[in-house]
Image (tube, rainbow, N blue to C red):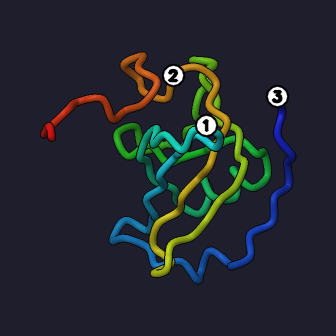
Amino acid sequence: MENTVNLKSSIAWSDFKLNSDGMVPVIAQDYQTNEVLMLAYMNEEAFNTTLETGKMTYWSRSRNELWTKGLTSGHLQFVKSLTLDCDNDTILAKVEQIGAACHTGNRTCFFKALTEV
């Protein structure tokens, strides 16, 4: 279940278009089902840690600290691919999700219906 580590980015962090906090949003998506799991943010340290470990690592804006997804819960996310959008300001992370992605215990953070067809 471990992923390959020491991933290489095709662009430098300095080439990303960062938000006012020096971060980029990251959409995590299941690599097999394409289900959108969650949205989080990365700073340069989180990005580099993700590349080095193969485990999705984010910056917790509420705790103001580095956060490797699942480190305490066991609900890890292993990187399968990282893709940058056309504006260089959002990352799509295809991941192998172990357990729930949402802190509520749901598989995905996107479970509250706003509209119905």
Numbered label attached to residue 68: 1
Pointer 1 with pointer 2, Cβ within 8 A:
no
Given the image, on which type of amino acid does mark 3 rest?
A: Met
Given the image, on which type of amino acid does mark 1 rest?
A: Thr
Secondary structure of the residue carrying numbered label 3:
loop
> Mark 1 or mark 2: which comes first in sequence?
1
* Disc number lying in front (3 or 1): 3
From this view, report whether residue 101 is shown above or below residue 48: above
Residue for point 51% across, 56% down: 42
Determine which residue is flagged by label 2.
100
Given the image, on which type of amino acid does mark 2 rest?
A: Ala
* Position of residue 102 in the picture relative to residue 14 (left or right): left
- Which part of the image, by quadrant, shows the C terminus? top left
Residue for point 60% across, 23% down: 75
Between residue 19 and residue 35, name the one nearer to us: 35
From this view, report whether residue 18 is shown above or below residue 41: below
Is the residue marked by circle 2 packed among few (<14), some (14-19), or many (20+) residues within 10 Å?
some
Residue 69 figure quarter: top right
> Mark 3 or mark 2: which comes first in sequence?
3
- Which part of the image, by quadrant, shows the N terminus? top right
Determine which residue is flagged by label 3.
1
* Position of residue 52 in the picture relative to residue 25 (left or right): right
